[in-house]
Image: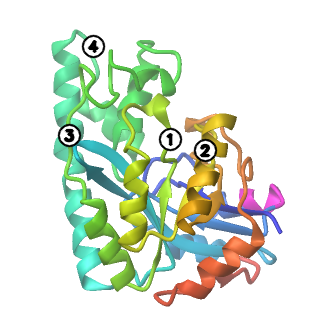
C-alpha cells in the first residue's frame, strides 16, 4: 500500500480542487490519501464525491498552533468535524486569517512592494487565505522567484519584515480538542528549520505525555540527519512515525506520494480514531 497522509487543496492553500487532488492521487498510484487543509474541513465533501474506486480518503485538517512563541502545526485525523469545541476553535483561527493577510499586504506596501489585497484575494479564491497566497503574489510581481523564497526574514518568515502573527491554538489545548472529537494527532514536520524557528524537540516528550499520537518524520523539509533523530525520538517515546508529501499542487515542488506512511502505522491510526472513518472510493462523479 502507498499511503500519503498530508495534502492540501484549494479549500486552504493548495492549487488543486479537492476533486482534482483525489483523482491525481489515484493516478499517482496511491491507495490512501489524507486531505488535511489548514484549519478547515470544507473540502472533504467534494473529495468524497469525486473519490475514485480503489483510493481511500482519510479526512483531516492541519491545525495552526503556537508553543512559547513558536508556530507549529498539528495534523488531526479522522475526528468528528461537527464536534462543537474543535469546530469553534477552527473557526476562530480561520476568522483571523483575513485581517492577518491584509496586515501583511500593508507591511509589504510600506516596504515598497506594490501588492494589493485584491491580488491576494484573487489568488486565494475560495480557500482559507494565508501566507502562501501572499507569497504567490510576490512571485507574480517578480519580487521573489518562488513561493519558498518568500519565506525568509526579508519577507514572510516568522519574525520577517512583513510577518504578522495570527491566532494559533496552544498545542496542548489542540490535543485535548482533537482527542475530544475522536481524532488522532500527529506533529507535522517538527524539524522544518528552513521555515523558521521550530519547537525544541524536548517539547515532544511533553506533548506525548499529553496525548500526541505521532510525529511526521519523512517530509521534504527534513534532511537525513533530522529524520534519523526524529525516528529515535519516536522510538523512545512510543510515538507513531508517519511520512507524507505535504502536497500543495503547483505551489510547492513536492509530488503526491513523494514520502509515504507504513501500512501498519496507518492501521494503528484508524484503530485509535473514533470520530470518523476512512472513506473507500466508489468511482467518483
The N terminus is located in which quarter? bottom right
Q: Which residues are magenta?
A: 24-29
Using residue 185 as the reference point, say whether residue 33 is left or right of it.
Answer: right
Per the image, the residue denoted by label 3 is 165
From the viewer's perspective, is the residue at label 2 or at label 3 nearer?
2
Within 10 Å of disc 3 (Cα), the crowding (few <14, some 14-19, many 20+) is some
Find the distance from the CA under tag 2 to the CA under tag 4.
40 Å
Would you say the residues marked 2 and 3 are in contact, meaning their CB atoms lie under 8 Å apart?
Answer: no
- Secondary structure beneath dot 1 equals loop
Find the distance from the CA under tag 3 to the CA under tag 1.
20 Å
Residue 255 in the image: above or below residue 135: below
Within 10 Å of disc 2 (Cα), the crowding (few <14, some 14-19, many 20+) is some
Would you say the residues marked 1 and 2 are in contact, meaning their CB atoms lie under 8 Å apart?
Answer: yes
**Is residue 71 covered in magenta?**
no
Task: Decide if residue 85 is in sight here.
Answer: yes
- The answer to which of 190 and 141 lies nearer the viewer is 190
Residue 139 picture location, percent across and down = 46, 21
Per the image, the residue denoted by label 4 is 113
> What is the number of the mark on residue 191?
1
Q: Of the two numbered discs 1 and 2 on the same chain, state the one appearing first in sequence.
A: 1
Task: Decide if residue 126 is in sight here.
Answer: no
Per the image, the residue denoted by label 2 is 229
Q: Of the two numbered discs 2 and 4 on the same chain, state the one appearing first in sequence.
A: 4
- Secondary structure beneath dot 4 equals loop
- Secondary structure beneath dot 3 equals loop
From the viewer's perspective, is the residue at label 4 or at label 3 nearer?
3
Residue 204 in the image: above or below residue 247: below
Q: Of the two numbered discs 2 and 3 on the same chain, state the one appearing first in sequence.
A: 3
Residue 117 in the image: above or below residue 111: below
Please name the residue shown 32% across and 85% down the image: 83
Amino acid at each position: 500500500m502507498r499511503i500519503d497522509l498530508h495534502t492540501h487543496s484549494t479549500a486552504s492553500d493548495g492549487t488543486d480542487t479537492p476533486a482534482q487532488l483525489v483523482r491525481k492521487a489515484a493516478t499517482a498510484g496511491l491507495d490512501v490519501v489524507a486531505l488535511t487543509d489548514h484549519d478547515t474541513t470544507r473540502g472533504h465533501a467534494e473529495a468524497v464525491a469525486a473519490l475514485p474506486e480503489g483510493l481511500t480518503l482519510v479526512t483531516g485538517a492541519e491545525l495552526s498552533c503556537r508553543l512559547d512563541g513558536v508556530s507549529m502545526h498539528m495534523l488531526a485525523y479522522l475526528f468528528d468535524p461537527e464536534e462543537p469545541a474543535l469546530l469553534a476553535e477552527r473557526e476562530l483561527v480561520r476568522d483571523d486569517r483575513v485581517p492577518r493577510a491584509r496586515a501583511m499586504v500593508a507591511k509589504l506596501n510600506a516596504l515598497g512592494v506594490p501588492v494589493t489585497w485584491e491580488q491576494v484575494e484573487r489568488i486565494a479564491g475560495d480557500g482559507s487565505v494565508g501566507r502562501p497566497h501572499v507569497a504567490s503574489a510576490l512571485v507574480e510581481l517578480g519580487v521573489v522567484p518562488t513561493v519558498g523564497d518568500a519565506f525568509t526574514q526579508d519577507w514572510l518568515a516568522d519574525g520577517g519584515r512583513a510577518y504578522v502573527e495570527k491566532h494559533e491554538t496552544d498545542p496542548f489545548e489542540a490535543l485535548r480538542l482533537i482527542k475530544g472529537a475522536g481524532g488522532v494527532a500527529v506533529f507535522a514536520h517538527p524539524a522544518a528549520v528552513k521555515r523558521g524557528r521550530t519547537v525544541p524537540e524536548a517539547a515532544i516528550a511533553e506533548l506525548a505525555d499529553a496525548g500526541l499520537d505521532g510525529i511526521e518524520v519523512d517530509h521534504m523539509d527534513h534532511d537525513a540527519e533530522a529524520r534519523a533523530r526524529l525516528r529515535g525520538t519516536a522510538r523512545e517515546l512510543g510515538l507513531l512515525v508517519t511520512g507524507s508529501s505535504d502536497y500543495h499542487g503547483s505551489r510547492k515542488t513536492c509530488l503526491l506520494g513523494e514520502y509515504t506512511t507504513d501500512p501498519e502505522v496507518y492501521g494503528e491510526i484508524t484503530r485509535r480514531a473514533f470520530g470518523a472513518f476512512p472513506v473507500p472510493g466508489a468511482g467518483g462523479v
